[in-house]
Image: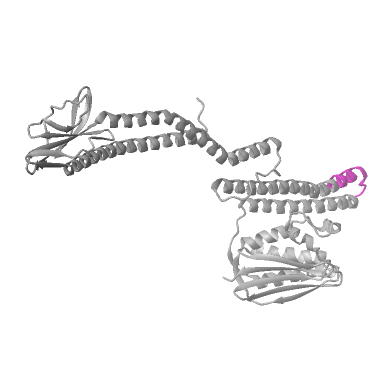
Amino acid sequence: MRRLSIQLKVTLWFTLLMVLLVSIVLVFLFSLGAQSALEGTKSQMMDMVAAGWHEIGSDDGAIEIDDDLEYFKDGIYLSIYDAGGVPLYGAVPRDFDNSAVFAPNDLRTIPSGGKSWYVYDEQKQVYGYGTVWIRSVAEADQIDSTISTLFRFALVILPFFVLFAAVGGYLITRRAFRPVRRIIQTAKEIGEGDDLSRRIALGEGRDEIYTLAAEFDRMFSRLEKAFETEKQFTSDASHELRTPTTVIISQCEYAIENAQTLDEAKEALAAVLNQAEKMAALISQLLMLARADKGHEKLHFETVNLSDLASMVAEQQQENAEKRGIRIETNIQPDIEMLGDETMLMRIWINLIENGIKYGRENGWLNVQLAQKDGTIQGCVQDNGIGIAPENLARVWERFWQADPARSASGAGLGLSMVKWIVEAHGGEIHVESTLGQGTAFTFSFPCP
């Protein structure tokens, strides 16, 4: 059995609710109307009786009734009787049995002639004459007939109202669910066409559906960026692995075909070993970054002397720096300690200093700084090398991106990505400032323990 759509469910609920509400209102109005009509008729009957008393008098023992007395008004009949019930003045309806017993000051319903009648009697003593009865009579069926006519009219109008409510509710819900259909259509087109650049783009809105659409658009943007990053990552990783793989294969083929002596074989094996080490380092870096992305890379926190790490790495890198004539200067405040992973913190210094040597100016300088101030531990590695163009500053953290592709043989472009992850994993922040042709400064900070 096919389930009803939410739009149809809302329409049915809206229609049933409106019908129920209108029905309750009509019952209340008809009940109130009937009661109001009865009270109005009773009040009018009593008013006619009260007015009749003002028109009755006596003269020499005989009753006198003013000719101006109205005996019929708005469907109400007025009649006057003596103490014995003999009619003296006025009129009664044709179908009414005028022999009904008098009951003073009481509105009664009396059946007569196949109809129902409202009857109201009053008795008074007329000075100089005696007892007089005044009776007012109104047809009860006429009031009920008016209510019944209104009720039948309501029953005729009600189906049109139900239809109007259903159509109106359907159109309202259809309009309200239009953004939902757009979301569904966009998601379907994205799924069928593999086009993550599509967006729902509902525009500005404050209700939940517009908020949902905006979240979907943001999600699609993140997915598109993630897929593009993955594609680029796969392409770059393949490119980086292809070069050492090609060298290994060619060296092996050369050694097999041409090596005549042990020294020639060792030379080929040394080239193979060098490329294999590069591949191993690249795979290790990729594995670490993959684990970091999934949150599987575990850090082993302990108290680390960050000053000693910085000094040790700077001293170790001095030999590489001297090959390019670069002078490493240090300005390291001693005995700065923090809680962190010693191996990972060491890699920050290694990667930043190696990066500074690689892109530094020949016969230039590299400055390593570390200090504790303003409640934070602040480190900086600055060079006076080739610098980075302003439009590329945000890209330095991208994997496999390099400022100078000509120097790519000495690295894969993963070092800064690792540095950024390590710094953030320790609760810190890292920033880069650079001027093209003048140098670059990487500054990072950690909260003090």
**Magenta segment boundaries in residue numbering:** 248-261
Q: Quadrant of residue 96?
A: top left
Query: Looking at the image, which residue sits at the far front?
Result: 60
Secondary structure that dominates the magenta span: helix
Q: Front-most of 159 and 334?
A: 159
Image point (89%, 50%), residue name: 262
User: In the rendered view, does 50 fall on the left or right side of 416?
Assistant: left
Indicate left or right for 118 with 17 as reference. Answer: left
In the rendering, at what x and y percent does residue 446 appear?
A: 62, 68
Q: Residue at x 31, y 38 (%)?
A: 33
Q: Is residue 20 above or below residue 276?
A: above
Counting from the top left corner in percent of width and height, residue 17 is at: 42, 37
Pick whichever, 326 or 323, lies toward us: 326
Is residue 447 in the magenta section? no
Way the structure is coloured: one colour
Q: Which residue is drawn at 19% across and 24% down?
A: 112
Report which quarter residue 428 is drawn in.
Answer: bottom right
Q: Can residue 104 be seen here?
A: no
Please state which of residues 440 and 243 is positioned toward the viewer in this rendering. Answer: 440
Q: Is residue 210 visible?
A: yes
Instruction: Residue 398: name its quadrant.
Output: bottom right
- Location of residue 279 with respect to 326 vertically, above or below: above
**Residue 320 image point, x, y percent:** 81, 67
366 sits to left or right of 13 = right
Q: Is residue 252 magenta?
A: yes
**How many tags in the picture?**
0
> In this picture, is 117 found above or below 54?
above
For the C terminus, the image quarter is bottom right
Residue 85's place in the image compared with 338, above or below, is: above
Which residue is at the front of the view, 85 or 119?
85
